[in-house]
């Protein structure tokens, strides 16, 4: 406990403040880890574009060299930790969420429908980031449900021969799962994860002032490009997994 | 007793003067309550842009500066209307005040060692600032000064000062009540015991009893309606509650300053720092008319002189015509974007936001507009009001009288801090040496009176005039007839019109009777005071048949040191229909009246020797109710040491 | 100058939030007003016209009317803005005005920002914590002008409350210092005259009322009428807090 001279107001004890710093580091760090993982994930799953053989080849390498198993454990852990630490910021009360949403909507729409300012500067550039945060929360919620189901399935698959032929990741079981009717859920999860991760990374950069030489509009542009690029690649992968398109790059891997 | 609170010192006004004074009193162990109509950081002091005069002499162009030179500039600027002893005290304490502010955290602009580029009288000049002065407080040029002397924080000096001073108020835990408007003083037998305030949240009244009361309510520019640079809250309630006592005189109310460069059409000030930093004034033919008019000081003559030249220039048909009236141009383009967005940043923002201009590329439309009231509650050199023990005043609300008939730019911020220090000390001393011996019945009856006045307004009905219409009528009269150029006929007309407006206040009817603060009622309660201030200003101007500083009479264009080397005092005795005027000597004279160095050199010389004049000062002022000061009159004079 | 806007005169419609807590008959509602636009009309002029010509009971706050005192912040079509510096020509014909959220309502468009800011300034200790008393006879301490300018930049906040009202977190967590509070902290942190050290600051800044309450909504930065670089300030504080724990 410490009092400041003059006002005599009481400030939080130091260990409480330290806790806040650690929470912040953990939620941001786990988010970052997950986001980076998702790039690798995309490459892994994207290998289906090379055909089932390509997919199995990569999966095989990851498993044979014991990259996959610890990663899976770490990611599951990070996923849980991130979910817990990040959601401490989600407003608990309905009326609080409503207030935030109303505010964010107002800020998003403020600039719309106005006549062009007669001078260059206008205080009415629309502001989107508040709304983006709300969507981050929403997509996070969706991921909590769909992502954990996905992880449970995957976990079972990797360590047990529940699906497919062998233990571990293999194209057959993946194709089986997706085609068994899980594709809409995967589609939704994909959309959520790409949105959440790109906005999350953008926010992380701004929050810590990383790359402060790059201006915010530039960061926003990078965020958008990343989002569409990764989403596109993910959709293509999903389409192949769902069996609507034969692997377009399969010709690369021939005997 | 829920209507009454007590404290040691009551400070009315949370601007620079009030807060600095409160800090001094609290440091001396007194309990202080500050009342303010707005949160203190929103006081109009925050709007001051250009700088604060203090003779630190840090940069090359300030070399050789000293409080003596500052004193001379101030007295010349005042057109010899100032109290020279007060000007002396002020000039000596201003450097301490500026350094104290640095200590409190003001981010003063500092001296950059090495080659610096300046614009001086239209020339680009390079000056090598020596390394040993590196990082000391920098100065900029201002009108009417012999040296660069204005200390500044970009073009947000007042803001930086007010935030630093208020941070000390927060630190000391001083009790500040915002949205509390003083509507009357509590006094009895020539002793002031505090004030009645009306809460602007609830509309309820409350008495604050104190051993010493300080009026620091700022200027009253709003009697000029929209034709002023002042905030909407500068309605002169402080001066008018003093006038209402019937005992306390207001000094030099006719001394009204017009600032040369005010943005058209918004009426927002563009600081003198622009001209100090090398900006020009241009007429519609892009001619620098100030170079012809004042070859020596050019754009940097004192404000009264520049404003008159500008008005004349427009009268001569050299102004730019627009639907919003005539204006001239202020040219800052040559200063460059870098300078404009750093040292004059606030000016840049104002131009962009209010008229969509880019000062690096565009000319700025300006014309002179009401800006400052040199007059106010007349006090002695301790800040103690004439005729009323326990009542003090400081800052723009006071007529301490270092400004006489024209205030120099940057001297007002300096005054608020210096007066805050000096008056604060004497307030604390006065409060410590007296006890609160007042009947609470007096306080309650004052609250009752105030409630009755509000009740009268609410009770009145019928088809009388609206309060805003009366305000507008007063403003039109003031700007048209009590402006930069005055003459007898116009002023007589003005007095007649203002008397009519004053009479109409009593017939006015409110259109809204809602409970609570009721904005219309809040304004109505100030209206009579404003009408009275306007009237005493016009009557004072009519009576003064000479031209001095900002008071310029076409029919008496010369300064008359034989007849008018004096200060106007006005009282409004209780229940009297008209105010009564009297005059006192300006104070002890050290620097004999002479040519200011700009403006007209012609004048009517004094007929009595200075020594004879000085001999009369004490008696002349005592007769007007001057309180005895801690140090006897004249003890601060430095006879001739300049 | 006035050319373009003088030609197209518009008819403006205002929808203004009304509620007078002192009046028992008053209930929160929106009231409509109409007004003809004039060149360079600011909301200061518009609101005063409405009050003087149409409804004299309308409450709102203005003082400087030049964007420096911070009195007049309100929600203009959903966005916190300084009304005195908002020109109607930059707005659509329908203008909705609400009082700032996150602050106590005084009446209609008037809110109590003063009390909030005083409390915030007390809590963060927003004054120079020097070691030596002022010496009237000493020359001022020199300071590099670039540093002085950087401090001035942070000092420019006018306590209008826009950043607080526009921040979702500040709206639901009244203890949060808000962007203005964090900016105030950073201003004193970079001032060498303030002798508080990393450890003194840590407790103030790192708490969940401080910088880690902020989730990076960025509204504060986009809204601040004085265009303070608030996000850079937040990032600076985060990094300082991190470094002060690592060391
Ligand atoms: C636009 C502008 C720019 C300026 N620039 C400069 C400059 O560059 N340099 C310079 O030296 N000077 C400048 N000045 C002048 C200078 O700013 C003022 O003279 C000075 O700040 C006045 O300070 P003050 O403390 O006396 O009053 P203010 O700062 O006006 O404070 C008055 C206080 O009194 C309170 N108050 C008023 N009436 C009542 C009441 N009835 N009851 C309770 N409280 C009340 C108000 O709320 C406020 O807190 C400028 C002035 C203006 C208008
Ligand atoms: C389990 C489901 C998830 C939930 C409930 C969730 C929730 C959240 C929330 C509420 C935030 C904002 C926190 C804050 O601003 O302090 C956030 C931030 C973030 N999330 Fe998630 N998230 C989830 C999964 C993920 C995943 C899978 C990724 C990676 C792809 C991820 C990446 C990020 C990143 C990078 C941030 C930014 C961190 C920051 O701003 O400090 N999140 N998450
Ligand atoms: C623990 C590590 C993970 C592994 C080993 C893994 C593995 C896989 C595999 C093999 C597929 C193919 C489909 C299937 O087999 O069902 C897949 C698809 C997918 N996974 Fe994961 N996953 C992991 C974590 C995650 C996480 C944390 C998320 C997001 C919250 C996620 C989101 C997706 C999505 C959206 C798809 C659809 C494919 C696409 O179009 O890209 N995965 N994953
Ligand atoms: S930081 Fe900006 S928005 Fe916030 S109070 Fe200060 S000036 Fe207003
Ligand atoms: S809007 Fe609020 S959450 Fe942070 S970035 Fe600004 S303070
Ligand atoms: S009235 Fe002062 S900021 Fe708008």
Image (tube, rainbow, N blue to C red):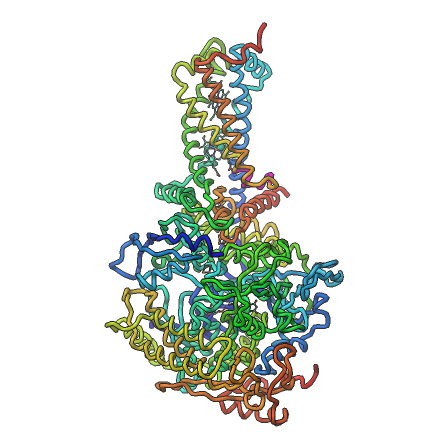
**Residue placed furthest toward the top:** A255
> In the image, which residues are magenta?
A203-211
- Residue B573 spot, x, y in % from top left: 39, 86
Q: Is residue C133 in view from this perspective?
A: no
Q: Identify the main secondary structure in magenta.
A: helix
Q: Quadrant of residue B513?
A: bottom left
For the image, the number of numbered tags is 0
Given residues A166 and B614, the one toward you in this image is B614
Residue at x 42%, y 61% (from the top left corner): C62
Residue at x 35%, y 43% (from the top left corner): A95
Residue at x 62%, y 73% (from the top left corner): B293
- Residue C94 spot, x, y in % from top left: 35, 49
Given residues B386 and B192, the one toward you in this image is B386
B61 in relation to C110, above or below: below
Residue at x 58%, y 75% (from the top left corner): B305
Q: Is residue B356 in view from this perspective?
A: yes
Given residues B259 and C25, the one toward you in this image is B259
Q: Is residue A208 magenta?
A: yes
Q: Is residue C118 magenta?
A: no
- Residue B128 spot, x, y in % from top left: 75, 61
- Quadrant location, the C terminus of chain B: bottom right
- Quadrant location, the N terminus of chain B: bottom left
Describe residue C47's horizontal placement relative to residue B410 as left or right: left
B238 in relation to B333, above or below: below
B479 in relation to B267, above or below: below
- Residue A78 spot, x, y in % from top left: 51, 29
Q: Quadrant of residue B457?
A: bottom left
């Amino acid at each position: 406990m410490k009092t400041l001279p003059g006002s005599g107001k009481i400030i939080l004890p130091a260990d409480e403040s330290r806790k806040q710093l650690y929470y912040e580091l953990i939620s941001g760090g786990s988010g970052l880890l997950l986001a980076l993982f998702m790039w690798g994930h995309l490459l892994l799953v994207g290998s289906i574009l090379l055909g089932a053989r390509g997919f199995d080849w990569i999966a095989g390498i990851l498993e044979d060299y014991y990259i996959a198993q610890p990663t899976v454990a770490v990611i599951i852990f990070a996923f849980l930790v991130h979910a817990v630490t990040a959601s401490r910021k989600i407003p608990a009360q309905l009326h609080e969420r409503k207030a935030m949403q109303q505010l964010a909507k107002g800020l998003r729409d403020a600039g719309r429908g106005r006549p062009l300012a007669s001078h260059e500067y206008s205080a009415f550039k629309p502001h989107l980031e508040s709304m983006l945060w709300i969507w981050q929360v929403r997509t996070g919620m969706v991921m909590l449900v769909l992502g954990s189901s996905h992880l449970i399935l995957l976990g079972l698959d990797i360590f047990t021969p529940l699906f497919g032929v062998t233990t571990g990741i293999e194209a057959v079981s993946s194709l089986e799962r997706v085609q068994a009717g899980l594709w809409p859920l995967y589609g939704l999860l994909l959309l959520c994860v790409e949105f959440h991760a790109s906005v999350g990374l953008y926010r992380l950069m701004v929050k810590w002032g990383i790359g402060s030489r790059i201006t915010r509009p530039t960061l926003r542009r990078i965020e958008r490009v990343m989002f569409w690029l990764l989403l596109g690649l993910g959709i293509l992968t999903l389409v192949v997994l769902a069996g609507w398109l034969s692997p377009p790059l399969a010709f690369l891997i021939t005997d | 007793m829920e209507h009454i609170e007590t404290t040691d010192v009551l400070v009315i006004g949370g601007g620079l003067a009030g807060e600095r004074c409160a800090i001094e009193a609290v440091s001396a162990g007194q309990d202080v309550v500050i009342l303010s109509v707005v949160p203190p950081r929103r006081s109009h002091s925050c709007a001051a842009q250009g700088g604060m005069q203090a003779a630190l002499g840090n940069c090359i162009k300030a070399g050789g500066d000293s409080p003596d030179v500052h004193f001379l500039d101030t007295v010349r600027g005042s057109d010899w209307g100032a109290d020279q002893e007060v000007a002396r005290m002020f000039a000596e304490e201003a450097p301490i005040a500026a350094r104290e502010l640095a200590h409190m955290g003001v981010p003063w602009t500092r001296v950059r060692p090495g080659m610096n580029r300046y614009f001086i009288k239209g020339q680009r000049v390079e000056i090598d600032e020596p390394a040993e002065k590196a990082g000391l407080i920098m100065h900029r040029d201002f009108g009417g000064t012999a040296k660069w002397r204005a200390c500044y924080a970009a073009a947000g000096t007042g803001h930086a000062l007010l935030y630093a001073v208020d941070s000390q108020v927060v630190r000391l835990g001083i009790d500040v009540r915002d949205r509390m408007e003083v509507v009357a003083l509590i006094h009895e037998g020539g002793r002031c015991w505090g004030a009645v305030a009306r809460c602007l949240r609830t509309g309820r009244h409350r008495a604050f009893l104190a051993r010493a009361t300080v009026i620091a309510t700022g200027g009253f520019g709003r009697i000029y309606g929209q034709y002023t640079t002042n905030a909407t809250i500068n309605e002169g309630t402080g001066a008018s509650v003093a006038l209402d006592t019937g005992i306390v005189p207001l000094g030099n109310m006719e001394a009204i300053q017009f600032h040369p460069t005010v943005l058209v059409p918004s009426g927002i000030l563009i600081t003198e720092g622009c001209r100090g930093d090398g900006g020009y004034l241009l007429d519609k033919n892009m001619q620098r008319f100030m170079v012809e008019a004042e070859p020596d000081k050019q754009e940097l003559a004192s404000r009264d002189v520049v404003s008159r030249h500008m008005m004349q220039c427009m009268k001569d048909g050299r102004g730019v015509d627009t639907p919003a009236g005539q204006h001239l141009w202020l040219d800052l383009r040559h200063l460059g974007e870098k300078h404009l967005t750093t040292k004059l940043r606030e000016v840049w923002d104002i131009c962009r936001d209010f008229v969509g201009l880019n000062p690096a590329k565009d000319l700025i439309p300006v014309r002179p507009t009401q800006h400052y009231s040199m007059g106010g509650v007349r006090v002695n050199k301790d800040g103690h009001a004439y005729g009323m023990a326990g009542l003090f005043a400081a800052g723009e609300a006071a007529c301490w009288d270092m400004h006489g008939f024209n205030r120099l730019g940057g001297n007002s911020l300096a005054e608020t801090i210096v007066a805050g220090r000096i008056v604060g000390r004497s307030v604390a001393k006065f409060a410590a040496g007296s006890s609160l011996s007042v009947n609470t019945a007096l306080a309650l009856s004052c609250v009752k009176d105030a409630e009755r006045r509000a009740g009268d307004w609410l009770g009145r009905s019928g088809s009388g005039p609206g309060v805003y219409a009366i305000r507008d009528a007063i403003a039109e009269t003031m700007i048209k007839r009590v402006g930069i150029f005055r003459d007898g006929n116009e002023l007589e007309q003005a007095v007649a019109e203002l008397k009519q407006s004053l009479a109409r206040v009593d017939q006015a009817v409110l259109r809204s009777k809602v409970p609570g603060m009721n904005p219309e009622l809040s304004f109505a309660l100030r209206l009579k005071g404003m009408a009275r201030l306007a009237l005493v200003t016009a009557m004072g101007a009519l009576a003064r048949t000479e031209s001095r500083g900002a008071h310029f009479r076409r029919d008496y264009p010369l300064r008359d040191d034989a007849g008018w080397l004096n200060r106007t005092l006005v009282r409004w005795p209780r229940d009297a229909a008209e105010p009564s005027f009297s005059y006192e000597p300006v104070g002890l004279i050290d620097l004999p009246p002479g040519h200011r160095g700009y403006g007209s050199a012609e004048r009517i010389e004094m007929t009595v020797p200075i020594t004879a004049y000085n001999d009369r000062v004490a008696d002349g002022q005592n007769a007007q109710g001057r309180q005895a000061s801690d140090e006897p009159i004249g003890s601060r004079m430095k006879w001739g040491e300049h | 100058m006035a050319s373009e806007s003088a030609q197209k005169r518009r008819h403006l419609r205002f929808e203004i939030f009304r509620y007078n807590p002192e009046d028992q008959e008053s209930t929160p509602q929106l009231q409509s007003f109409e007004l003809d636009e004039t060149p360079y009309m600011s909301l200061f002029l518009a609101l005063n016209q409405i009050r003087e010509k149409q409804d004299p009971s309308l409450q709102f706050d203005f003082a400087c009317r030049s964007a420096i005192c911070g009195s007049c912040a309100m929600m203009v079509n959903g966005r916190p803005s300084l009304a005195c510096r908002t020109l109607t020509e930059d707005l659509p014909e329908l203008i909705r005005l609400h009082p700032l959220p996150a602050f106590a309502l005084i009446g209609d468009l008037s809110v109590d920002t003063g009390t909030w800011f005083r409390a915030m300034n007390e809590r963060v200790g927003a004054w120079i914590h020097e070691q030596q008393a002022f010496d009237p006879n000493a020359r001022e301490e020199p300071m590099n002008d670039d540093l002085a300018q950087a401090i001035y930049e942070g000092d420019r906040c006018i306590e209008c409350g826009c950043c607080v009202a526009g921040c979702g977190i500040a709206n639901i967590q009244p203890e949060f210092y808000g962007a203005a509070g964090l900016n105030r902290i950073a201003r004193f942190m970079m001032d060498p005259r303030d002798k508080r050290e990393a450890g003194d600051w840590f407790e103030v800044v790192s708490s969940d009322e401080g910088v880690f309450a902020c989730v990076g909504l960025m509204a504060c930065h986009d809204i601040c009428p004085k265009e303070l670089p608030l996000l850079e300030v937040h990032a600076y504080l985060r990094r300082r807090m991190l470094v002060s724990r690592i060391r």
